[in-house]
């Protein structure tokens, strides 16, 4: 399986947001994540980095 887990970085901690992410859509001010079960999350964040080998997506909250 090629799904990834999405984490948001808060300080020096990584908080799991959604497992088994299949689709992510970057919009101007938010990210939409959809997993293989149809669960969706919309976050005011941007992609910080991705590790494809580890199947991880790291997000950073938008600064207000």
Image: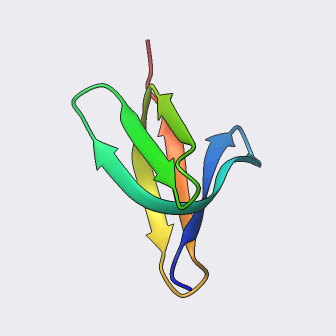
**Residue at 57% in and 76% down:** 55
Residue 6 coordinates in the image, percent (x, y)? 59, 55
Q: In the picture, residue 37 is in which quadrant?
A: bottom right
Q: Quadrant for the C terminus, please.
A: top left
Q: Is residue 31 left or right of residue 26?
A: right
Looking at the picture, tell me which residue is in the foreground, 50 or 2.
2
63 to 10, vertically: above or below: above
44 to 1, vertically: above or below: above
**Residue at 44% in and 25% down:** 44
Looking at the picture, tell me which residue is in the foreground, 40 or 18.
40
Looking at the picture, tell me which residue is in the foreground, 3 or 47.
3
Q: Is residue 29 left or right of residue 28?
A: right
**Residue at 56% in and 69% down:** 4
Q: Quadrant for the N terminus, please.
A: bottom right
Residue 32 coordinates in the image, percent (x, y)? 40, 39
35 to 50, vertically: above or below: above
24 to 3, vertically: above or below: above
**Residue at 54% in and 88% down:** 53
């Amino acid at each position: 399986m090629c799904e990834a887990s999405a984490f948001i970085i808060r300080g020096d901690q990584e908080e799991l947001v959604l497992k088994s992410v299949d689709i992510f859509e970057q919009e101007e001010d938010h990210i939409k994540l959809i997993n293989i079960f149809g669960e969706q999350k919309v976050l005011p964040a941007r992609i910080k980095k991705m590790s494809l080998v580890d199947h991880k997506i790291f997000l950073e909250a938008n600064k207000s």
